[in-house]
Structures are given as structure tokens and as C-alpha cells.
Amino acid sequence: MAQDVLQQTYDAIVVGSGATGGWAAKRLSEAGLKVALLEAGRAVSAREFTEHVPSFQLKYRNHSPEVMRTRPIQRQCYACMEYNYEWFVNDLENPYSTPPDKPFTWQRLRILGGRSLVWGRQSYRLSDVDFKAASRDGYDVDWPFSYADLAPCYDLVERYVGITGAAEGNEMLPDGQFLPPMKMSCGEIRLRESIKKKFGRTLTIGRAAILTQLHNGRAPCHYCGPCERGCVTYSYFSSPFTTVKDALKTGKCTLITDAIVSHVEMDTNANKARGVSFVHRTTKETKQVRGRSVILCAQALESTRILLNSSTREYPKGLGNSSGLLGHYLMDHVVGGGASGTFQDLKILPNANPPHRPNGIYVVRYRNTPAEGKHPYFIRGYGFQGGSAPEFNMGAPGIGADYKKAVKLGTYDVSLGAFGESLANFDNYCEIDPKLTDAWGIPALRISMAHGKNEAALMRDAGITAAEMLEAAGANNIRLTTGVEMPGMAIHEVGTARMGNDPKKSVLNRFCQSHDVSNLLVTDGSCFVSSACQNPTLTMMAITVRACDHLVERFRRNEV
């Protein structure tokens, strides 16, 4: 690393290079600000993508748990495997703690682009039923802005990213700027038509950050399928090859990799952030970067960890924590409810080498809606993700030729899995563990979260109604689940530095600016007031655009 990179004073320091950090770097540098973009991991290139590599070419054929012995927590993520496990953090070097009775799985990447390299790409807008949920049911508080305030930023992000999807005109899931939708299977079309006719509910093709046509110089998806192993055509959105690339192209953005940020440096006389300190990942040297503003985009828990580790005499409980709410109201979508079955009358044979559509279907929330009214047993709601396609029947009975024949005949499967809203709860929180540090000497988190009675009721209802919808569509062998998975399994952590208009009841204002420190912003999922039930990344990116545009205006008015 050239020493002059660290001797400069930047207009903005962006911590984290994932979905939100990439947008912050792009938006600010394209506005003319001098930006330092810090990433805790190394750079990544398309040469290491493995989406076309068959498992027999791997040393352990993707079947040995030993290869991931340093990732006992990360391997709980469907996307962590022999192909790409080195992208994920080494759990032995990056510990955190939980109470014995409150397990939490924290799945993390430390590499340029972060989780944008392996995310599920599902991209759904929130509506005013979500932003103003408290006004409807009386639980907690509303967000400090409305859908109309964020809609232009949703438009901008979608036009740039490229979202495949279909307009449905459903008030619970606002339509966006869509590329042509991917096609649904026969089973999915049957399910869509059945639940619309019998229940009045909306099933749509997934809205996904994957291209279906040439877009912004990136090629359309070629349906190879395993997107979590990379994409050599850059057809799905990941920040290194889109937003970060654009930011670096301006000449105004300096990328600093292997920079594990420990805390924000403060100018206590001016009550402003003056930069950040970081530990170099490989040399373990401590270094500083100076800036006129600091934007944390490190991921909800990680950004909050940085703030908690940035305590000063003026802010003994964590930087920007005069409200005492920093770390509290941690949320992660509740999962575990759903149903699966088969369409026995659909006699389409499975194929070992079909196009692999990297997308599924989505059933829009139908509980506690303006049209339905209030449910008697729970508030908020859930949506379903799933799919239907012919599959090989590997569990078929028989032996020898009979078994092979049964396997090839296959089954036409259908499934729906729910993602439910996680209620904001003060008692779900993270804090610094006084006895635990990571491999770089930085104090680690203690995470305490549990899903409550409302989340359990959501999953019970989700399992029952999913089974009802499959049965109505003619499915057989229906199996339903109504349990609750441990927090973290949805990988949709939000909250911990919530927005609000009242500094006594929130950490950030409606532009993600710290109430306490005017040149400090947090624009990742930390700022969420509620979780809604939709995947959060699209909303995070839109919020980041809105916050950064407001920061640019403040620079123009010499307010930073």
C-alpha cells in the first residue's frame, strides 16, 4: 500500500464494499468527492469463479467437511462450499459469542464485494404498509420517511442494477423498473392460477438482480445456475464489477483492501469524525485514514460493532449512542414455515443438463393487509419463495435396474418456504463481549436474539396456508413445516442503529446521519426500523443512494 494513500484527507471514507458500500463509493465519487473505499478482505477477480467447474474436479468433490473445518458456522450457509469457502470468514479468527440458550448464526464474507458475491439476488420493494406499519397496528414506531420519499431511489437503483420481474399491481409489493421476466414452469403456472382463483392471492416470478437482456454492458444470464460461485458474464449484480468498478473509473475513488476497521477516530473538540483506524489483514499493522466524513456500510452487525468499539469519554457506551439504543432492535427474518408436495399428474421427465433458472417464484404477503384486515392471532405478515420443477427421485424404492428406472421417472416437485417479519424488540441486541477478541485484537460481539411468539405464530400460519394452497392446486404427498429456525438463518440482519426523527429514540436521522456526530453516516441494514418480510438488499441500496445524495448536498452547502 502506497504511503501517500494514507496521508491524504478524503472527503468521504466508505467502510465496506458490498451492496451498500459499492453504491456509496459510486454515488459520492461520481458527484466529485474524493473517496476512500475500505474493504476488510482481498480483491476478487472473475478468474476464481467456479460456476462452470464440475465437482469431480475438486480435491474433495465438494463432499468433505474437513475442507471447511475453519468455517463451522459459515458452512451453515447454503452458499458456503468447497468451491468458494475461502470467501467466507474463518470462524476461528472471527469469533463472536451468544448466550447458551440463544443461538445465532452470523454468516459473513471478507472479500471485495462481500455478500453481494453470493446473495440470493431477490429484490423486492417495501410499501407504505411496511414503512408505516406502526400506524396500522400500534406496534413500535413508523419509519421516518414514506414510500414516496424512497421511490425515486428505488427507480434509480433498479434501472442500473437490472431487475428481472413482472408487474402485478399489488399494493403490498410495489412494481418497479423491470427487465423482461424469466419464464415460470408448468407447475408454477398451475399454482399461480389456482391460488389467484381460489384465494385471490398473487404469485409472481421472482424479482431478481439478474439480467435477462444486455444491460449496461453486461451480458444476459445463460442459466448455468450456481450463482453463489460467481458469474463470469457478470449477469447477476455484485458490487466489484458494477458500482465499485464505476467508482474507481472516476479517478476519485481509492480502494484500500485488507483493511479491517477497528474504530472511528474522533475530533472531540469539533465533535466530528476525522477518520478510521484499521488493522492490516496480513501484516497486522495499525493504520489510519483521514476524512471529512465517514460512511459505515460494513453490514448491520459489523457497522454496529465498529461504533460500539469507538467509545470515547464523550460517548462511553459507543459512538453516537446518546440514546442508548445502539445495538438494540436486532432483526432477522423468521424462516421455517412452509410446505412441499408433488404434482403426480405432470409427467415431465427430469433432465440432468437442463437450463438452470437462477430464480424462483414469490407469493406476495396476504396477511394483515388493507384488503384483508387484521388477523386475530398475529401482526405483520410473511411472503413465500419457492418453485416447481421435475426432479430425479433419488429416494425411490427398488434396486438395480428397477431403481434406475424409478430415479429417471422422477417426481414433479413443488414447494413454498416463508420469510416472515421479525418484530423490532429492544431485548434483541448485540454488545461488545469484554472477554473476546478476534485475531487482530479487535473486541468481538456478543449477540443475543430470539424469535418471539409473533414470529412463531407467523410460521405456524405459513405452514398451514402453504399446504392449503398446494392442495388446492392438486398437489399430493404434501408435507408441511411450522417450526422456527434460529435467528441468522435468513441472512437478513437489520436494525441495531435505527433511524428516527427523535434523537432520544433513535441512533440516526432520516438520512442515515448520526444524531450525535453530524459527519458520520450508517447506510447498511443497521438503519432499518422494521424488517418487513421482503428481502432487504434492494431497500438498503435505495436508502444508501438517498443518504449519499443528501450528503453531497451538504458538501455543496459547506455543512460537512
Image (cartoon, grey):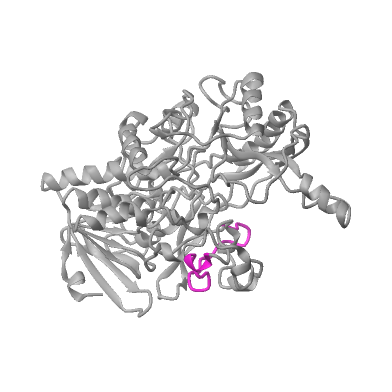
Check the picture and name the quadrant holding the N terminus: bottom left
Q: Quadrant of residue 503?
A: top left
Position above or below: 100 against 498: below
Q: Nearer the viewer, residue 42 or 511?
A: 42
Kindly identify the residue that appears in the image at 40 percent across and 47 percent down.
219
Q: Nearer the viewer, residue 385 or 143?
A: 385
Lateral position of residue 500 relative to residue 65, left or right = left
Q: Nearer the viewer, residue 64 or 269?
A: 64
Q: Quadrant of residue 180?
A: top left
Q: Which residues are magenta?
A: 84-104
Lateral position of residue 39 relative to residue 31, left or right = right
Q: Where's residue 301, x and y in %?
A: 44, 56
Residue 505 seen in render: no
Is 165 covered by the magenta stretch?
Answer: no
Kindly identify the residue that appears in the image at 85 percent across and 53 percent down.
403
Residue 24 seen in render: yes
Position above or below: 466 against 537: above
Q: Where's residue 76, x and y in %?
A: 60, 60
From the image, give the main secondary structure of the stretch colored magenta: loop
Lateral position of residue 252 relative to residue 456, left or right = left
Q: Nearer the viewer, residue 229 or 337?
A: 229
